[in-house]
Image (tube, grey):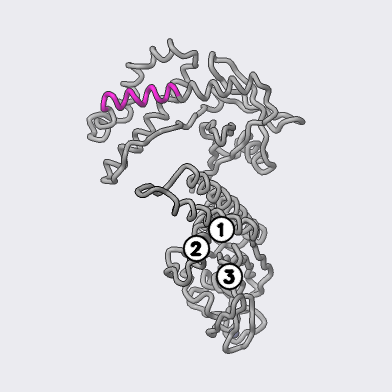
Amino acid sequence: MQVAKSITVKVSKRINRDKFLSLRNFFNTYQTIARFYYSYILENSLEEKLVSGEITSKDLKNILHQKLYRQIRETFDIGSQTVQEIRDTVVGVINSYAQLVKNGKKASLPKVEEFTVRLNHPRVVSVFEHGKEFDFFFKVKVNGDKRVAVPIECGEMQKQLLKDALNGKYKIGAFQLVKRDGWFYFVIPIKKEVEIKQKYDGVVGVDLGLRYNAVITLLYKNGKITKVEFLKYRKLMHKIRELWYRIDELKSMLPEGQNTSKRIQRLWKRIRRINDWIAHNVSKKVVEVAKENNSMIAMENLKRLYPVKGKNSRKNNRRISNWIRGKVVRYTIYKARWEGIRVKLVNPKNTSRICHLCGAEGFRKDAIFVCKHCEHTYNADFNASVNIGIRATLPNAKGCVNHPVGLIALQSHPF
Ligand SMILES: [Zn+2]
């Protein structure tokens, strides 16, 4: 199976002014040319012809080349490789719209504010390692076919991934230059072939809850729970709730017929960012534990979540945490796949109602689970996470009956 991932690195803030201006200029020229292609397509209804099948996307590329290429080269001081890359980017955007319409989906023409700036590696951008001051230099062919060495900063993990990719361990796709909050970043897609492992020594059960963002337990093949981690981002969750309330407040003050505003959207964006950060960190931890212990991962299948009940504030809490939970699951699958680790999504029904030790029913008292049969008490989320792990490996088992020491029954299970 082929798996993909992308590395994001930042243009160093210590870049000198001339270089920064060249890069920005190049970015803007790219956008101008892309919009030029785009409006030509719309003016000549070429997107309709693509939808009806009268022309193919290859035809579209040819038409654009014949009609506009020379004019663009004469107007803008930019390399032919880049001009073709821009044309292909625009055709890509139009083509994915056409495919949607063809498949009967209701789609409207994309309102493109910013096109993805794709840079062919190694023709348009090449990478140089830099020992001390910066992590890398990216030499980018900008306007006038001039090459600018852009200083790059990145984290240790990104650095290693990029080095490995350059050494041929992964396939590298076209680099993307993106602008976020007024600054530039490069996104580098990489790919590799992966075989999902078949044999494991344990299972990492993950409970994604309200009280904790995640409880991670490692159920080892000897039937023992050998690792437990409680992850909680209390301050960030509090921040999200605060932002959420502020959005509600702003919404109630909007004029009739209007359901959002620039300010509200900005707040959403901040929430999204915090969510992303939490989901990224939780999933990273889960995959780390699984990798270190040669274990597969078990999580709840979120489609089977129960309907929302209760008071409004609880409802909101649940909505916020569901949102993050969805992200954690997606990111975990994505990160685990890269490592060749299997993620099994299990039906979460009753995982918080049965005792992980004896399988009998119990009840929750706030954060505590009390078993009616063996009378043990546990942290409720911990109990659920073990049950999720058990369910992934022994789908029909309810706890592990009559074995108070641990889950010995799992010993015989091959995982
Ligand atoms: Zn019990």
Location of mark 1 (residue)? 241
Instruction: Indicate the position of residue 20 as horizontal and vertical percent values.
Output: 62, 23
Instruction: Indicate the position of residue 272 as horizontal and vertical percent values.
Output: 53, 49
Q: Which residues are magenta?
A: 32-45
Location of mark 2 (residue)? 316
Question: From the viewer's perspective, is residue 367 above or below residue 186?
Answer: below
Query: What main secondary structure does the magenta stretch of the protein show?
Result: helix
Q: Nearer the viewer, residue 203 or 154?
A: 154
Instruction: Indicate the position of residue 126 as horizontal and vertical percent values.
Output: 60, 26
Give the Cα separation between the discs numbered 2 and 1: 8 Å
Left or right, 270 with reference to 45: right
Location of mark 3 (residue)? 385
Q: Nearer the viewer, residue 133 or 58?
A: 133
Q: Nearer the viewer, residue 286 or 260?
A: 260
Q: Amino acid at mark 1?
A: Arg
Element marked by disc 2: helix
